[in-house]
Amino acid sequence: MICPACKSDALIVEYKNIELDYCPTCRGVWFDAGELELLLESAGLERYQSLLNKLNSDPEAVSSEKKRKCPICRRKMKKTYVDEKGKVLVDACHRGHGIWFDSGEVDHLLRSLAEKSAEKTAYRDVLAFVGEVFKSQ
């Protein structure tokens, strides 16, 4: 896959049968349809899937960020917030092909969801993995 942010070649990173496309240049990550849900489920955070379900129904967020093209259909994606506080702005394919997270955004999303979780140990392995691979340095 070609990175929608910087046009570099992305690498495939696998975690618990979830194949993610990771750009080592800009440190962004592409989740194909259903992959973020699998990551949340593996972290014990599946009850937050309602956040993802609203991606298609929410209006486009106002942003000065350049719109990215979906690496699958090549159409411009929608800028939308994936968290409740409006801090994690992602690019979501209008056709449902996937979601693009810029560097550090996956880590930020998981940490914000984990803060609300009563079960702190359920997501520790996922956070360690995300911290190593996707965290902004």
Image (cartoon, rainbow, N blue to C red):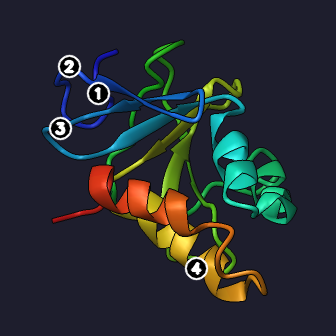
In the rendered image, which quarter contains the C terminus? bottom left
What is the three-letter code of the residue carrying label 4?
Answer: Ser
Q: Position of residue 85 (x, y in %)?
A: 62, 83
* Amino acid type for the residue under numbered disc 1: Cys
Structural crowding at the residue carrying mark 1, measured as other residues with C-alpha within 10 Å and reported as few (<14), some (14–19) or many (≥20): many
What residue sits 41% from the left and 63% below the top?
128
Q: Are marks 4 and 1 in contact (CB under 8 Å)?
A: no
Identify the residue under disc 3: 24
Q: Identify the mark nearer the N-term, 2 or 3.
A: 2
Q: In this picture, is 36 found above or below 11?
A: below
Question: Relative to 11, is 81 on the left or the right?
Answer: right
Q: Secondary structure at mark 1?
A: loop
What kind of residue is marked 3? Pro
Residue type at tag 2: Asp
Instruction: Identify the residue shown where x is 46% and y is 15%.
Output: 74
* Circle 1 residue: 3
Q: CA distance from mark 4 to mark 3?
A: 24 Å
Position of residue 44 relative to residue 85, above or below, is above
Q: Secondary structure at mark 4?
A: helix
